[in-house]
Amino acid sequence: MAKELNTDYWDKDLVKAEEPREYNTLNVGPTHPATHGVFQNVMLMDGEFIVSTEQTIGYIHRAFEKIAERRPFYQITPLTDRLNYCSAPLNNMGWHMTVEKLLGIEIPKRVDYLRIIIMELSRIADHVICNSVIGVDSGALTGFTYIFQDREFIYEIYEEICGSRLTTNMGRIGGFERNFSPKVWDKIRYFLKTFPAKLQELENLLVRNRIFMDRTINVGAFSAERALAYGFTGPNLRACGVDYDIRVMNPYCSYDEFDFIVPVGQSGDTYDRFMVRQEEMKQSISIIRQALDKLDKMEDKETYFAKDPRFVLPPKEKVYNNMEALIWHFKIVMGETDIPAGEVYHCIEAANGELGFYLVSDGGRTPSRLHFRRPCFIYYQAYPEMVKGNMLSDAILTMSSMNVIAGELDA
Amino acid sequence: MFEIIPERNQLVVKKLTDCFGESIERSEVLADMLCLTVKSAVIQEVIFFLHNDKELQFNFLTTLCGMHYPDREQLGVVYHLHSFENNHRIRIKTEVPLSDPKLSTITTIWPSANWQERETFEFYGIIFEGHPNLQRILNVDDMEGFPMRKDFPLEDQTRDDKDDSFFGR
C-alpha cells in the first residue's frame, strides 16, 4: 500500500513554522556599489527575505553646522554645495534666499527668473541621475549611459555661469556674480531643444518595459499616512499621493507667476517615484521656457543683483581705482559686514524635498546657530519599514528610488 | 516669505493659553513665523495638543534642532511644525537647564523625530526621555563631549595655539 501523503506542512507558511528559523546577517555597505553612497545596512535575512534592517549612517559626517558657526555668510555657501552634491545650485540659492530674508533685501524680478532657470536645471540634473540609476539597479544600463550626456551638458551650463561643475558655489547674496553670457543663453536654448526627446527616449526604454515594471510596481510601497509621519517631502511624498510642493504652498522666488503641474502618484511604490520624477522634469522644462519668455519680454537685460552694497562685490575697475570700493571689497570678502540680529526659517523645494535653513543671528559676523533641514536625513529613517518582508534585490531598488544622497544625509 | 495669517496665529495662542495657561511663557512673531516659548515640562503635551486639535491640525514635523545659550547656562530645543491643511507654520521653543537637560520625546507622535532627537542628543547632550534608542548617530559611539555646545572647540583640541578668537568667535 502506498504511503499516505503528509499534507501537514502544506499550510505552514514562514511564520507558523514550528522549528526555530535560522537567520543570516548580511552587511550591505558601507561601500557597496548598489548603495550609491557611503552608508551601511545590516540586514537580518530569512533566505532572501528581509526580516529587519539596522542602519548606520555618519560615514561622511563633516560637522557643517559646527563649522557654519565660525564662518561669515559667504563662506557658508561652499558648505551647502556639499549637502546634496547632485544639485548644488539649488542649495546655494536656498542659502542665499535665507540670508536675504534675514536682511530684508528686495530682489529684482530678473534675478528671480535667472535663479529659477538655474534651480530647474539642477532639479533636472538631480532627477536624471536618480531615474537612470533606478534603471541601472534593475539591470538596464543603456538609459543611464545615454542620458548622462545631458547631465554633462547641464554641468557645462553651470561651468559657463560660475566656472565650476559639481560643487558650484554659484551666485551671491542678492543675485549673481556676473550677468549670463550669450554663450549661456545659447546653451540653455540648445538644451531645451534637444533634451525633451532624449528624456522621452529614456522613458520609452523603461516605462512600459515588462522587466522594469515587474521589478518596480508594488515594490517599496508606502502609504501617505506613514510618509507624513516619517517626514517625507518632495517627490517621495508626492509619489504617495500628497500634493505638497513648496513652490505652490509657500511660493518663493516668484514661482507664483509660473504655470506648472504638481504630479502625484498613488501607491508610493518605486514605479510611482520614478514616474513622479519623470513628470517633474517635463514640468521643469516648461518652467524654464516660461522664464525665458518672461526674460525676453523684459526691457532690462543687465540687472543681475539687488541694489544692496552690503553683499555685492563692487566691480573690479572700481576696486583698483577707488578707495571706498576697495574697503567694501575687503569687508565683504573677509565677512566684516554687519548682520542684524534675528532668526528666520526658509525652505525651498530641493530635488529631494523640503530643504530648510533655520538661521539664528546674534548680530555677529557669523550665524550663532545654523540648522539644515536635510530631507534625506529625515526620510531615510523609514527605509527599514519600507523594505521589511521584501527581497534583497527589491530593497536595493527601493533605496535608489528614494534618492538618498550621502552628503545630505550626514551633513 | 511665508504668508503671515494673524487670525491663525491668534487662534493658536488663544487655544494654547486656554489649555496650558502659565506654561506658555511667550508668543511673538519673528520675521514671518509665530514663535512660542513653552516650559519644558509640558512640551510633549503642547505638541500632542497641536497635532490632535481638529482646528489647528499641525500634522507635520518639519524639523527639530538643539540650541545652546552659554550666558544663561541653558540648552534649548526648537521645533518647527507645519499644518498642511491650513498652510500654517509655527516655531516652538523650549529650554532646559544645562545641569539637568531632560525632555520628553515626541517620537510617540511622529516617528520622524527619532533620528532628529538622536542628533540633538549627540550634538548637545539633551536627554529625550522615552526615546526608543537614544544613541549617537553621526559620530562614533565612544566619542566624548557634545560637539555643538559653544565651549567645544572647533579646531584640534590637543593644540592650544588655535584659539577660537582667530576664527571669528
Image (cartoon, grey):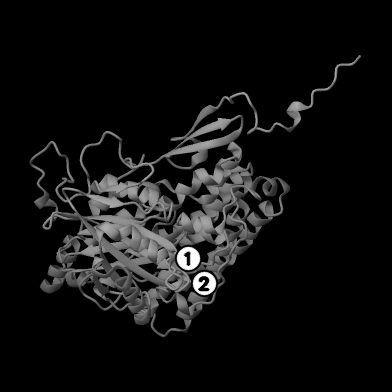
Residue A128 in picture, x, y percent from top left: 54, 55
Judge from the rendering whether residue A251 lies leftward or rightward of residue B161; answer left or right: right
Q: Which residue is mark 2?
A: A287
Which numbered dot is residue A120?
A: 1
Q: Nearer the viewer, residue A185 or B62?
A: B62
Quarter occupied by residue A243: bottom right
Note whether A76 is above or below A45 in the view shown: below
Residue type, mark 1 in image: Glu
Q: Chain under label 2?
A: A
Q: Position of residue A48 (x, y in %)?
A: 61, 32
Decide if residue A92 is on the left or right side of residue B156: right
Residue ranking furthest to the right: A1
Residue at 48 percent of width and 63 percent of height: A121
**Disc 1 element:** helix
- The image quadrant where one finds the N terminus of chain A is top right
Marks 2 and 1 on same chain: yes
Whether residue A173 is visible here, answered yes or no, is no
Q: Is residue A148 above or below residue B16?
A: above
Residue at 9 percent across and 46 percent down: it is: B163
Task: Check disc 2: other Cα within 10 Å, few if <14, some if 14-19, many if 20+.
Answer: many
Does the rendering let one see residue A291? yes
Real-space CA distance between mark 2 and mark 1, rounded to the nearest whole angstrom:
7 Å
> Circle 1 marks a residue in which chain?
A
Amino acid found under the numbered disc labelled 2: Ile
**Residue A264, disc:** none
In x, y percent, where is residue B37? Answer: 25, 66
Among all residues in the image, which is located at the extreme top? A1
Q: Tags 2 and 1 in contact by the CB under 8 Å rule? A: yes
Residue at 59%, 26% (x, y): give it.
Answer: A21
